[in-house]
Image (cartoon, helix red, strand yellow):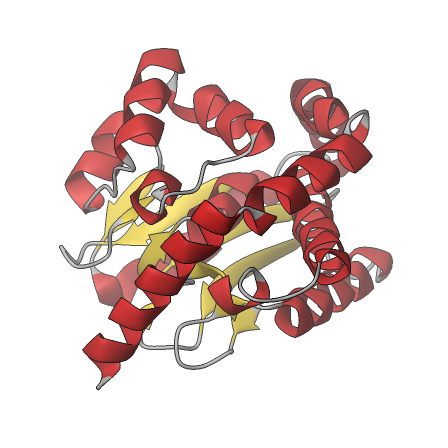
Amino acid sequence: VKMRNPPVNSLSLEFLTELLISLEKLENDKTFRGIIITSDCPGIFSAGLDLLEMYGRDPAHYAEYWKAVQELWLRVYLSSLVVISAINGVSPAGGCLLSLSCDYRVLANNPKYAIGLNETLLGIIAPFWFKDMLVNTIGHRAAERALQLGLLFPPADALQVGIVDQVVPEDQVQSTSRSVMAQWLAIPDHARQLTKNLVRKPTADRLLQQRDADIQNFVRFISRDSIQKSLHVYLEKLKEKKG
C-alpha cells in the first residue's frame, strides 16, 4: 500500500477514509495475508494528522475527523493481516502513530528521517491510546520522556530506543520489508492472529470502551481558543517556510 497524498501525506479526512476502505478490501480478500505500508512521496512517510482538519472548523467536523483517526488506528492495530511499515521518509506524530500500529517497522537510514510523537511541540497532547502504544513499544520511562519533550528520533536513536525494529540503507527498505514479511508469513495465520489479539486487545479495548468520551475530549480540547491560536501560529509558520 503506497500512500500518495502530496505534498506530505497528511492524514486528511478524505485520505483517512480512502486508506480505511483500501485496508478493509485487503482484509476481506482472503488471497492477501500481509501488507507493507509505505510512501509514494519522496522523503516523507507521513507528516501526520492534517492540522487544517483541526483548525477553524465546527465541532461536528472535529468529531467526524477524530472518529476517522480512531478507526484507522483500530483497523491497523488489530488487523488480522501481517502489517509492516516500510518507513521511507520523515514520520512525525500521526505518521509515527501509523507506524507504531504495524507489526514491524523498517526505517531508511537517512539522518533527515526522524520519527516520534511530537505533539507537545505544537502545543497539543497525544491522547491516552497514542501514549499506551508508545509505552508498549519502548517502555514507560522512555515514552514519558519522548512524549513530554516531543522527541523526534533520527534512525540510530529510533533503533536504540526501539521505536523501529530495523534501520537499513534507503535502497533496501522495500526488499528488507519483503524478507521480514516472508518470516512472519511462515507462521500459521491462526496462531499468529490469536497471539496478536491476545497481546493487543487490552490496549485497543481501552479506546473501544471510551471512544465517545475520547471524541468529546478531543473536540473540547481542539476548540479551545488557546489551542486554535497555537495552531494558527504554527500554520502561519508553515506558510512562511513555503513562501
The answer to whether 88 is drawn above or below residue 135 in the figure is below
The answer to whether 145 is drawn above or below residue 241 in the figure is above
Residue 28 horizontal/vertical position (percent): 86, 58
Question: Which residue is nearer to you in this view: 243 or 188?
Answer: 243
> Which residue sits at x=45%, y=54%?
95
The answer to whether 224 is drawn above or below residue 13 in the figure is above
Residue 162 horizontal/vertical position (percent): 32, 29
Q: Is residue 219 visible?
A: yes
> Which quadrant is home to the C terminus?
bottom left
> Which residue sits at x=37%, y=49%?
106
Residue 12 horizontal/vertical position (percent): 59, 68
Residue 59 horizontal/vertical position (percent): 72, 56
Question: What is the residue that sits farthest to the left in this orientation?
Answer: 111
Q: Is residue 189 left or right of residue 86?
A: right
> Which quadrant is home to the N terminus?
bottom right
Q: Is residue 242 left or right of residue 219?
A: left
Question: Which residue is nearer to you in this view: 169 or 87?
Answer: 87
